[in-house]
Image (cartoon, rainbow, N blue to C red):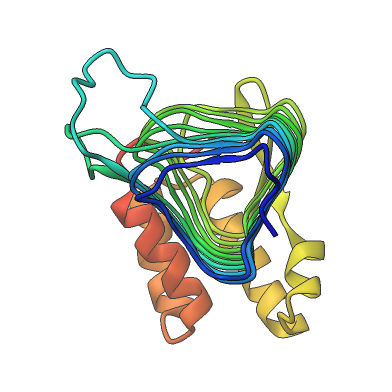
Amino acid sequence: MIHPSAIIHPSAQLAADVEVGAYSIIGEQVSIGRGSRIASHVVIDGPTWIGEDNHIFQFASVGAIPQDKKYKGEPTELIIGDRNVIREGCTLNRGTAQDKGKTVIGNDNWIMAYVHIAHDCIVGNHTVFANSATLAGHVEIRDYAILGGFTLVHQFCTVGEYAFTGMGSAIGKDVPPYTMANGAPAIPRGINAEGLKRNGFSTEAIQRIKDSYRLLYRQQITVKEALVQLEADYGEFADIQRLIQFVQASQRGLVR
């Protein structure tokens, strides 16, 4: 299961059935759960904790120190959940002491080639990162979000649940749940109706989300006024509460 040319630190903890390909290097303070496959020429540094059934392809760099001049060797970490696919050439960095001290990637994410996930990012579950999508530090990508190829996300931005960014987008503000955004700088383009259908949202829920988007973006009212109206019209629905809470918590402001 482990190629003879692989170099694995004696302190690394690998489940018995983990596969490690030729010329890969597994460093100290690395833990890899059962069923995971590490291809050839992968470098995994620590502290890094990798769950079960992950597949990391060749030439990925996982758990390297953050690209942050303030980093002074603090024992920060990278945490990766289960059933993630991390394709060729991806770079996933550990956190910094100035923020959470960790970078976290959840479960069931599809991370395509040459994606960069910087320090202190939080990635949820069931996300898709198309080729060369790039996260600056301190970014949050929530469940079921999709980032188109070459999407760039500015530090401290959040991309909400079921949101979608078009290829080549430059995200400098928060993208609300269910919203499609693209452009450089990115602007909102409607709701991710197809993505919602694929994930089991009812026709009624999609219409409700569409109406909420219009209130937020198409009516000549302030965001505060839109939130009051959303609460009055749809406050009992969990999907709209998610949108309301996202907007209320936004620190960067919304794409507009």
Residue at 34% x, 39% y: name it: 120
Nearer-the-camera pick, 25 or 211: 25
Nearer-the-camera pick, 223 or 152: 152
Residue at 31% x, 55% y: name it: 248
Whole-percent x and y of residue 3? Answer: 70, 47
Compared with 207, 64 (above or below) is above
Whole-percent x and y of residue 77? Answer: 31, 44
Whole-percent x and y of residue 18? Answer: 62, 63
Residue at 80% x, 72% y: name it: 198
Quadrant of the frame with the C terminus = top right
Compared with 69, 105 (above or below) is below
Residue most toward the front?
4
Quick check: 250 left or right of 84?
A: left
Quadrant of the frame with the N terminus = bottom right
Whole-percent x and y of residue 122? Answer: 41, 50
Compared with 95, 238 (above or below) is below
Q: How many numbered circles does the render carry? A: 0
Residue at 62% x, 55% y: name it: 145
Tell me, yes or no, if residue 56 can be seen here: no
Question: Residue 171's quadrant in the figure?
Answer: top right
Tell me, yes or no, if residue 214 can be seen here: yes
